[in-house]
Amino acid sequence: DEEDKEDEEQEGEQKGGVYGGVSIQGDNEALTVEWGGDWDEPKPAQLGGVCREVVTKLMDLDESGIFAEPVPDDVPDYDGHLALIGTERIDLGTMKKQSRRYKSVAALRDDLTMMLRNCMTYNEPDSIFFAVAEMIAVQAPAIAASAIAKFGGAAATSSGGRSKKRARR
């Protein structure tokens, strides 16, 4: 059936490019996300405030509120897509609620990466969802650096590197 062949071709479709500070390469099943550089870690006493500040600023960027809440349950085959790429639902609202529970800025970055990966692999590059994800990707490293500086500076550097995103919780 022609429709089934089209669906199979789309599932293995290669996506790639550099979107601000994020390089995305591969297909939906083996997509890698690489941030362009390291994110510093704040002093331990400042971590919760830094994480909350980063997420709040990212929510401010997302004026349309696309990432403010979980993707609605009625979005066609979204859960199937997440199962295909091995991730789970995550959004800025959830990150904000758990901002004091993060053990590092790297853990926050991992959730942010998962959110962007979910969006950028599910949506087409010319969609508003992809455009907002790209804007967040471009601004996130500077927002994190600014939040760390605001709360008293860095303690150490976290690894930036490449990570294959899979469910982490």
Image (spheres, helix red, strand yellow):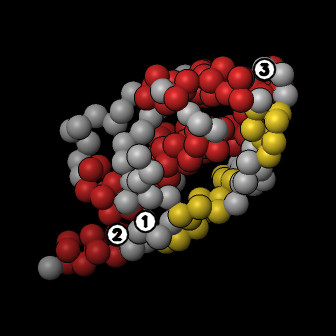
Point out which mark residue 86 bears.
Answer: none
Q: Is residue 97 visible?
A: yes
Q: State the image coordinates of residue 130 (x, y, percent, origin top left).
A: 51, 46
Amino acid bearing label 1? Asn
Point out which mark residue 151 bears.
Answer: 3
Q: State the image coordinates of residue 64 (x, y, percent, origin top left).
A: 49, 24
Q: Residue at x 41, y 68 (%)?
A: 29
Q: Which structural element holds mark 3?
A: loop
How packed mark 3 is, by other alpha carbons closer than 10 Å (few <14, some 14-19, many 20 or more), is: some
Which picture quadrant has residue 1?
Answer: bottom left
Q: Is residue 128 above or below residue 37?
A: above
Which picture quadrant has residue 32?
Answer: bottom right
Amino acid bearing label 2? Glu
Which picture quadrant has residue 137?
Answer: top right
Q: Which structural element holds mark 2?
A: helix
Which one is in front, 6 or 133?
133
Q: CA distance from mark 2 to mark 3?
A: 43 Å
Q: Residue at x 50, y 58 (%)?
A: 165
Which one is in front, 167 or 20?
167
Mark 2 in CB contact with mark 1 (< 8 angstroms): yes
Q: Identify the residue position indicated by label 1 in the image.
A: 28
Q: Identify the residue position indicated by label 2 in the image.
A: 11
Q: Residue at x 47, y 70 (%)?
A: 30
